[in-house]
Structures are given as C-alpha cells and as structure tokens.
Amino acid sequence: MPVVDLYNSAREKLGTVELDERVFSADVKEHLFHMVVRHQLAARRSGTHATKQRAMVAGGGKKPWRQKGTGRARAGSTRAPNFRGGGVVFGPHPRSHAFQLPKKVRRAALRSALSRRLGEQALYVLDQVVLPEVKTKHFRTFLESFGFESLLLVVAQEDHAVRLASRNIPGVTVLPVAGLNVYDILRHRNIALTAPAIAPIVERLTR
C-alpha cells in the first residue's frame, strides 16, 4: 500500500495516509489517455455548425432561362449549388460529436492518471481546505504554502466557498469527486485530494 503524508492547509504534517494500491499504484497505460481525452473533448463540442441546402436558401423560385435554345446548360433555379448564393452540397449540419467508450476503459485511464501523479510525487492529501474568509487572497496563501502553480483540488462534495475563492486564479481547478476526470488530472501539474474524498474515489474506481 502506498503511504503519503497528510497535511493541513498551512502545509503542517498531521500524519500519514495509506492509499489503495488498486487505484493509486495501478499500471500506467498511457495509450488510454489519448482515447479518454478525445472522448471527453468530443462530448464537449457543441456541434451547432450548419450550412443551408438548396431547399433552405431564400429565392430562386423562377426558372432563370428557358429550357432549350439558349446554348447554356439547363437550369431550374438560381439556388442550385452551382450558382453563386446557392445551397451547399454535403455541408456540415448540427450533430453530436460524442462517442462511447467502455466504462472499464475510462476507469483504467483514471487509475493510470492518479498513479502517474503519485509516482511523480505530485499527489498530495489534505485533511481539509479551510479559509478564514471566502477571498482569493486566502486561497493564494494556501497555494503559496505548498508552492503550487498548477493545481487540481478534489473535494468530497461541492465546496462553494473554496470554488468561489479559487475561480479567478489561472491554473487552478476545484472539482468534487463526481467530476474527477483524466483531462483535468493531466493538464494540472499537481493534484491534491482532501482526506474525505479518497474513499469515494476508491469506491468509484474499484466497483
């Protein structure tokens, strides 16, 4: 079982914590990172890009010239795709870019990401994050005590005070356990877990 130090918000050591090796010392399967990050980012795409087909373009009700005798190709509408201002052929239409990945793949990638951060000594465990006031300067003081410039803070449940105090600081993200994901782990240099968040993470990744 990996053992890490337990700190308070002022980086005072309070003891140690044993982490579940199934989650925090798993094999790091880096090929899964690409798959899962693509899956996450594809699901975020709005998919609202659209073009008009000839039936959607205004105008073009009158036949532009007679069928025969002009020496030109026959035409029935100026809204045809070969006319300027006409409809678009095979253009994009609103759709979802999301695709499915098996749950076991997503869980394996999350275990790999956590294990990688622990192996890099970039995973910290805090008893809790307590701020004197809901102010950004107090959260900055917490960051400075650990030397964090890029941090993903994972709390057991949504913490309104911590989220408000940290939201204007670049490179800092606060997530509840339910929102923990591979993309945010990989894009932050450090990850800090509050002690109450560890059990739900283990339960989520070992069931």
Image (spheres, grey):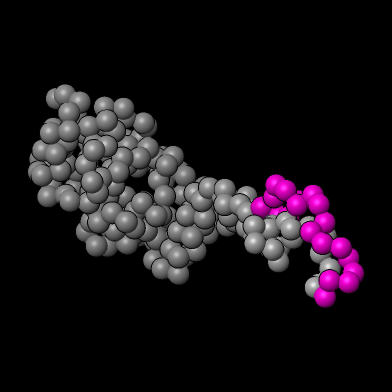
Viewed as shown, does residue 36 lie left or right of 164?
right
Viewed as shown, does residue 197 lie left or right of 29?
left
Between 3 and 52, the one nearer to me in the picture:
52
State the count of labels. 0
Q: Is residue 47 above or below residue 70?
A: above
| Residue at image coords 86%, 63% | 66
Between 197 and 101, the one nearer to me in the picture:
101
Residue lying farthest top? Answer: 133
Viewed as shown, does residue 94 lie left or right of 127?
right
Residue 167 visible in the snapshot: yes
Residue lying farthest right? Answer: 68
Residue 207: give x, y in percent of width and height.
52, 47
Residue 150: give x, y in percent of width and height.
22, 51
Residue lying farthest front? Answer: 70
Residue 7: give x, y in percent of width and height.
16, 41
Between 105 and 127, the one nearer to me in the picture:
105
In the image, residue 58 lies in the stretch drawn in magenta? yes
* Quarter of the figure with residue 117: bottom left
| Residue at image coords 43%, 63% | 33
In the image, residue 164 lies in the stretch drawn in magenta? no
Quarter of the image containing the N terminus?
A: bottom left
Viewed as shown, does residue 137 lie left or right of 100?
left
Q: Is residue 168 above or below residue 1?
A: above
Start and end of the magenta stretch? 52-71
Magenta part mainly helix, strand or loop?
loop
Between 94 and 180, the one nearer to me in the picture:
94
| Residue at image coords 31%, 27% | 160
